[in-house]
Amino acid sequence: MIDFADRMNKIRSGIRGPLYVETLKMQERGEKVLRLNTGNPAEFGFKMPESVKSALYDGAERAVAYTEPQGMKSAREAILAYHETKGFENIDVSDIFIGNGVSELAEMAMLATMNAGDEMLVPTPNYSLWSNSLYIAGATPVHYTLKEDNGWMPDVEDIKAKITPRTRAILIINPNNPTGSLVEKELLLKILEVARENGLFVVADEIYDRLVFDGKTHYSCAALAPDLPVITLNGLSKSHIICGFRCGWLVTSGKNGALKKVKEALFSLSAVRLCGNTLTQLVIPAALDDEESTKAMLVSGGRLYEQRKAVTDVFSACEEITCVPNSAAFYVFPRINVKLPFKSDIEFGLALLHEKKILIVPGSGFEYNGNDHFRIVMLPEPETLGKAMKDVVDFIRKHAEEK
Ligand SMILES: Cc1ncc(COP(=O)(O)O)c(C=O)c1O
């Protein structure tokens, strides 16, 4: 038997973990399951915007060749303009790398920057892409805790306490997955000051920056700290409903060419895989020009707005669950307040799956300690979602009584 490489012992995806595998088996047997495990809007009937569709259909002929390793110039120009509008300073198209989703670029960013044994500060709970990318690079995630009793905000003292001589960088996922929390400007400035004082570079995953509710503003780390070396990641999977296109980008910024060597490494890695998918690069200018289709989902009557309401209405009326409402994205990370007869959160998820035919992701899938959290993806239509949340509450009440 050929064994897999040692590094694979650390690689795992809670989102497509054991509960997901069990769901596939149930579906093969013909059972219907409401899959609330992935942030994949098209699975729930969301359509790509017309702007994106026509750019794709009209331009397909132009998208049959490889592009430059960093991506099409016209697409990088559009990305540049977008980030300049967000307040990035002193960047140009050479700072932009287009790739097959933030996922590919996260791995490239870690390979380009981290040596074996290096550490990056990573929030918990988090989306596991980043720890997995660190493990692939031979590096180590060190967790700082997002505080649930403070709206899932990072805690500056906790961040400081986690810094060691091996710490190279801090990851800020803002808005966050799985909590849907949005870090406000003042707190971001404090975290960036910690990075500055300790000579860390910043990795900012901002893929949900356009999906912000209630008139709130998203601030980019790179714009708040133009002096610091910052690697920003963003993409169109969520805001423009094209997860399957695999369309993301990375922007390097900072004073005095602090990331010059990193750009060389990113260029080499980009060249090794020739280029990102050309068809998807084609739609970037049209998508970034079309803010309205995203905004329409976020206001009263829009799907994301109404679906958030369907979930929070149920949970806010239920004592057994505490749920910090999300300010962005389409996730919440509720806590179960009662004792249940399950040994782990995975067992809780399995029982829920079998009894109610609802697939959630347990808290441990987001590197979160404790057995009492799970993530809800708020993408089905409000009625379906509201009913499913009532089923979750009924399930918790029933099993709490067994105890
Ligand atoms: C925080 C975060 N970053 C990155 C990604 C992956 O994005 P992409 O589809 O661009 O690979 C996700 C997907 O859910 C995410 O939640």
Image (tube, rainbow, N blue to C red):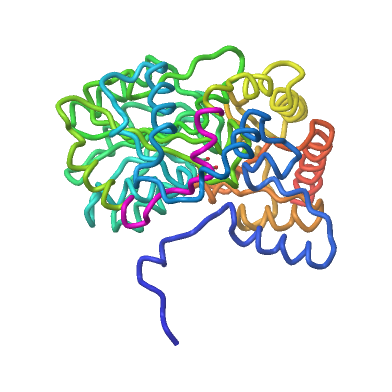
Side (left or right) of 297 relative to 122: right
- Residue most toward the left? 256
Residue 251 seen anywhere in this rendered image of the structure: yes
Side (left or right) of 51 relative to 208: right
| Above or below for 350 versus 169 | below
Is residue 389 shown in magenta? Answer: no
> Residue at the location (84% across, 60% down)?
31
| Residue 48, image x, y percentages | 67, 35
Side (left or right) of 301 relative to 64: right
Side (left or right) of 210 relative to 303: left
| Residue 96, image x, y percentages | 34, 35
> Residue at the location (31% across, 36% down)?
170
- Residue most toward the top? 215
377 or 257: nearer the eye?
257
The residue range painted magenta reads 270-286
Quarter of the figure that contains the N terminus: bottom left
